[in-house]
Image: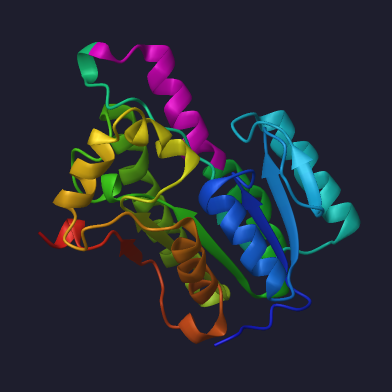
Amino acid sequence: MAEDFTDKVVLVTGAASGIGLAQVKLFKDNGATVISVDKNDIPMNIETFKGDVSQADFIEELFTKIKTKYDRIDIVCNTAGILDGYSPVTETSLDQWQNILNVNLTSQFMIIKKALPMMLKQDKGIFVNMASIAGLVADGGGVAYTASKHAIIGMTKQLDIDYASRGIRANCIAPGAINTPMNAADFAGDGKMAKWVAEQTPAKRWAKPEEVAELTLFLASDRSDYIHGSVVPIDGGWTAR
């Protein structure tokens, strides 16, 4: 079922590849005005802001431009994130810990803090935050990644509880094995790791980023208006085992 997002302003971070790029394309195909954000070049002819979402100065500049040009924001997809190489505590430096949390978690907090007042002024707004199965169970990443994704889920639930009565909806997605450039290392060489992951997944395959984008579109639509503070896994049954 096609959705009409005409007149909706949508912000997508991590938009240069993978899930973020798939989200950008799908929202654009459904009529939205899409603002894409990434520190890498975004291969589409749309409104693009290049910068590091973990940096407060960049977030400040970004929202100054959004307010000046659009004076509204309807949907935020906090998709940007990085992996930590499955590093346990003894192999995780303080710098790596802080970098993972800054990119994965603090960037979402800063964007929410800037977008929320605009949404409250409109009496409506939607956040779709990117968590992970690593936010639900252990062994989906290293200690820093797992901690950041658990924290995103907690932050999203509290955000929704605090502002649901004022027209705000906040949910998060928990992807499992998604075939994106971020997971390219699993397919390197003979692809042994990618094959193992597929074998361990009940659905016996990796998902495409477009599948996550479709879920995002649903969570951002009026069809999901009664879904609040939820974590929606899209993991081929991984967390059901």
Residue 26 in the figure: left or right of residue 28: left
Is 92 magenta? The answer is yes
Residue 226 in the figure: left or right of residue 115: left
What stretch of residues is rendered in magenta? 91-107
Corner quadrant of residue 205: bottom left
Question: In this rendering, is residue 13 above or below 59?
Answer: below
Query: Where does the image place residue 105, in percent across and percent down from the top left?
Result: 46, 39
Q: Residue at x 36, y 26 (%)?
A: 84
Corner quadrant of residue 188: top left
Q: Residue at x 54, y 62 (%)?
A: 127
Q: How many marks?
A: 0
Query: Where does the image place residue 199, in percent across and percent down from the top left?
Result: 16, 50
Q: Residue at x 40, y 59 (%)?
A: 173
Q: Quadrant of the C terminus?
A: bottom left
Query: Where does the image place residue 3, in percent across and percent down from the top left?
Result: 62, 83
Question: In this rendering, is residue 70 above or below 92?
Answer: below
Residue 152 in the figure: left or right of residue 102: left
Is 35 magenta? The answer is no
Q: Quadrant of the N terminus?
A: bottom right
Query: Where does the image place residue 210, in percent across and percent down from the top left?
Result: 50, 62
In this view of the protein, which residue sits in the foreground, 20 or 164? Answer: 20
Q: Is residue 42 visible?
A: yes
Q: Main secondary structure of the magenta part?
A: helix
